[in-house]
Image (cartoon, grey):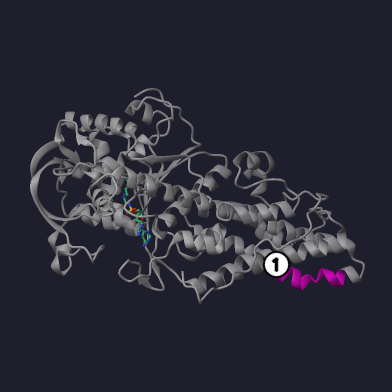
Amino acid sequence: MGSKIISKNLFAITTPLYYVNDLPHVGSAYTTIAADVLARFRRLQGDSVLLITGTDEHGQKIQRTAESLKRTPQEHCDLIVSGFESLWKQLGIHYDRFIRTTDPRHEAIVKEFFQRVWDRGDIYLGQQKGWYCVSCEEFKEERDLLEGHRCPIHPNREAEWRDEQNYFFRLSRYQHQLEALYRDRPDFIQPEIRRNEVLSFVSQGLQDFSISRINLDWGIPVPSDPTHTLYVWFDALLGYVTALLEPDSEPTLENALAKWWPINLHLIGKDILRFHAVYWPAMLMSADLPIPGCVFGHGFLTRDGQKMGKTLGNILDPVELVNRYGSDAVRYYFLKEIEFGRDGDFNETRFVNILNADLANDLGNLLNRTLKMVHKYCGAHVPEFSEEKVQADNVLAELGQDLGDRVARAYTTLKFSEACEATLTLVRTGNKYIDEQAPWSLHKQGQHAAVEQILYTVLESVRLAAYLLSPITPNLSTSIYRQLGFSLNFNEQSSIDVTAPFVTHAHWGALPPGQPLEEPYPVFQRLELLETVPL
Ligand code: MSP
């Protein structure tokens, strides 16, 4: 491999590469929002980040879907991909790379990788017999299937019996190396529950898995035997590598791996854990490549307590959701309401209530009423503030002191809900504080300095909260910052780097006294529940 630029600040993160059998569902939106939030947080901290997303376009599932819609597979993929791109735009996802596995450069990477594994002696021809779920694109153990050989993840589909010649990957050869990986790097699989699932699966003994299919045109031909097509998962996982290529560089493994490999974090849902935490590291070991930093498997979303599915007719359309409530609301709900890693639920009434309570009332109203008082009592600029004059026991200053550090730890460990809770605690304390201090009475008593100190500390709390929430609610945070007299956009990294770097703005006291303020206007409109028009 060529020379590597070593910098502790490089951070590469991936979402799964989504199947294009259908338009994006809320599950894909969930992973992508979480990845974007983490990427934004790392960028805020000054890291150089590469956020990779994309689409997994080959295989039987896509081929059949296209056929049933009377489209060519490529036409079908192009159509669906534009649906993904437009949803990511609507949701404010700032990805750096969008990899499509039909990209011709990807085929070159797959072929080179295959050759390495082949040269290692890890690929052989064998007979594959078993039940195949086309929707999962995975062979299933008979004992894991429901009655009638239906797949538990796709209960309305029957798995298909296959008895054919396939090429196999010698996964069994990597049993000990994988066990050593899990032992030596206990953080490789997160959270703990997912790690345990993998440990238990691997301890049963690993079997080789087939990496080619016959009678399938829509895919990459096996380089050593073009009568076979590569198994879609073997091809798709390598999409993460292809995505690392600079736009104008030759598609070679050396080029792809030069800067960003190994990827720091693969963010996935729990159903595709085995592929990422067992098959993928084994494939990389075979090709003699370093293993990524971490695979994090999040939980599944339900709707009103029920599994979402076409047959139940309760699929939540992310496009509808964001059209109705806006991107900040959607991002906030999923990250605040669900502990990342666990299963979670979407309920529209709870959605509206949480958004109204946290963002419209607690945060938005606090800013609005404080700004109105500032305009009335202090003029249209940030009140004077001197650290010495603030009472030593000022509850907001005290809470704000180490909030940035605590929230940073929460984001770094993907505890998004904790990051929101800690920030909201400051905001709620701000509301209590202003009620207790009653600056309107102090104003009447002519205690101007005290009024200024109180209003300053509250505005500063709102600012700090807006900054720390900005990876999740970039639009709301931008509006708050604008009202506080900053000209910056949390959707433009260069503007943050110049105007609000993490070293100062994640800490208490960054609001400059005397800074001119905007006229107050509500930053977050209360949401209305449209019960008559279910999503
Ligand atoms: N194409 C593969 C991934 C290949 S990565 C090299 C794939 N695609 S997928 O579109 O079916 O799934 C993408 C992601 O959506 C998975 O991480 C999956 O866990 C997630 N979800 C699908 N349904 C979900 C919920 N109901 N809830 C949360 N996430 C869910 O698998």
Where is residue 231, by image quadrant? top left
Q: Residue at x 54, y 57 (%)?
A: 327
**Element marked by disc 1:** helix
**Left or right: 315, with 503 as reference point:** left
Q: Which residue is at the far bottom?
A: 532
Give the vertical position of 103 relative to 27 (above or below): above
Please tell me in which quarter of the rendered image ligand 1 is found.
Answer: bottom left
Where is residue 153, by image quadrant? bottom left
* Total number of numbered discs in the rendering: 1
- Numbered range of the magenta stretch: 430-442
Between 205 and 529, the one nearer to me in the picture = 529
Image coords of residue 99 (percent x, y): 39, 40
Q: Is residue 497 magenta?
A: no
Q: Disc 1 marks which amino acid?
A: Asn
Q: Residue at x 18, y 44 (%)?
A: 216
Image coords of residue 218 (percent x, y): 23, 42
Give the vertical position of 453 relative to 528 (above or below): above
The residue at which mark 1 appears reads as 365
Provide the major secondary structure of the magenta segment.
helix
Q: Is residue 438 magenta?
A: yes
**Left or right: 46, with 445 as reference point:** left
Q: Which residue is at the far right?
A: 446
Between 432 and 19, the one nearer to me in the picture = 19
Q: Which residue is at the far top?
A: 2
Image coords of residue 119 (percent x, y): 17, 28
The answer to whether residue 402 is visible is no
- Residue behind label 1 places its C-beta within 8 angstroms of ligand 1: no
Image coords of residue 85 (percent x, y): 45, 47
**Left or right: 162, with 456 as reference point:** left
